[in-house]
Amino acid sequence: MIVKIMKSGLLNAVALSSVFLFLFSSCLKNDEEPVPVYTMNDYVGQWKGTFPMNAVDDPFASELKMSLIPYANNTILTGYLKSTDGILILDNAIFFGGVYSFTVRNNSFYDPNCQSWNASGSAYLLHINNIGISYGGTFCGTKPIDITGTMTRASLQPDSSVFLTMAAAGHRLVYDVTMFSGINEEATMEYQKDLGTGVWRMKATLNGWPNVAYLFVTPVEWGTLPMNDSLAEKKITAYRIDAKTGVKYITVTPGDSIISTVTSLGEMVTVPAGTFRCIKVTQEFKPLVTGGMDETREFWISNYFGMVMMNRYLNDSLVTTQVLKEKNF
């Protein structure tokens, strides 16, 4: 009987010791677990939250939606903040040490006080499904405002419909070009390299012709570059992705005044490569030198693939058409 009790007591002691060691080792394991370091891909998706939208003493609040998407071979993160008033583009984004820093680009083309903002912010993950947002600065000529709050994840899939997402090295577009003289040629556009801060260069060539042109695309802009693409700051903007119809972009060069107008945001265009939903932009070249000719170009551009079709007019006569016949992405 005594042996049985001693044996039972020994077993109980061993069991208690095992439980203690397990709990102790579990504590050590928890203490040693590293703090999670979130990567850029953890931010990708759609988020929503309610934020104060005016001065600190103003109780007005609004629900914001945010979408973040990788861009240019997954080298940068870009996105937008959407409110009932419109879309705020998050531009020139930097991701470092788990924190996403951005500048806030306004979307107003009509209010002169809203043409130049000085606003920036940052985002950091509190949890894989919760994100902290803090941004502020001068908005539309008002005093600096700080906006902070949290968002919850609404979807793992970003809303890419409002971004130009085609930029990646090696993406290639091939076109049939018909000229008024009866000459038919083949043209190509190929994405080559990132010029910095998300400005992606495209090289445009026309078989049988010596000239090479360069275009650019960013997450929110489409346009042309000078022949020397080191002068990227002198790029001509054809349109911005958050533009409204009727918006005009004016660029003055030594030879021309170039006026680009967004004329449609959702035209369906069918070409040999398929059917695409496009933004239509009309460019007018007004000569500033004697002997110059009025030139007009119509562009149909897909947010996902790039230029789908182009018509070129000289003095109102159609002289060139260019249509997409194949692509490799």
Image: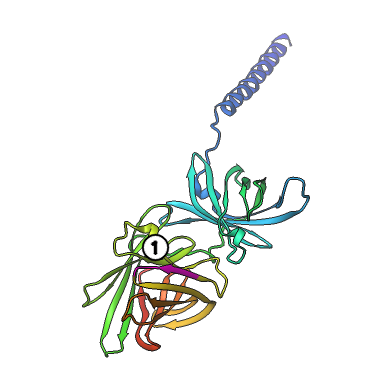
Where residue 279 appears, as percent x and y from the top left, is 50, 74
Q: Which image quadrant for residue 213?
A: bottom left
Q: Main secondary structure of the magenta part?
A: strand
Judge left or right: residue 10 versus residue 297. Answer: right
Instruction: Give the quadrant of the C terminus.
Output: bottom left
Q: How is the image coloured?
A: rainbow
* Horizontal arrangement in the rendering, residue 314 relative to residue 89 (left or right): left
- Which percent across, then down, holds residue 269? 47, 82
Residue toward you, 77 or 222? 222
Residue 281 or residue 34, whichever sits in front:
281
Which residue is most to the top? 2
Left or right, residue 80 beside residue 236: right
Which image quadrant for residue 90?
bottom right
Tell me if mark 1 has few (under 14), some (14-19) or many (20+) residues whose alpha carbon lies within 10 angstroms of its own.
some
- Asked whether 261 or 36 is in front, the reply is 261
Q: Position of residue 71 (x, y in %)?
A: 45, 57
Q: Is residue 225 above or below residue 35?
A: below
Q: Is residue 220 visible?
A: yes
Q: What type is the residue that disc 1 sits on? A: Lys
Question: What is the secondary structure assignment of the residue under circle 1?
Answer: loop
Residue 150 x, y percent position in the rendering: 67, 46
Q: Give the magenta range.
A: 249-254
Can residue 68 be seen at all in this image of the molecule? no
- Residue picked out by circle 1: 235
Examine the rendered structure and indicate whether residue 23 appears above or below residue 285. Answer: above
In the image, residue 51 lies in the stretch drawn in magenta: no
Please tell me which residue is depicted at 58% across the width and 26% down the height of the picture: 31
For image coordinates 54% across by 72% down, the residue present is 247
Please state if 128 lies on the left or on the right of 178 as rendered. Answer: right
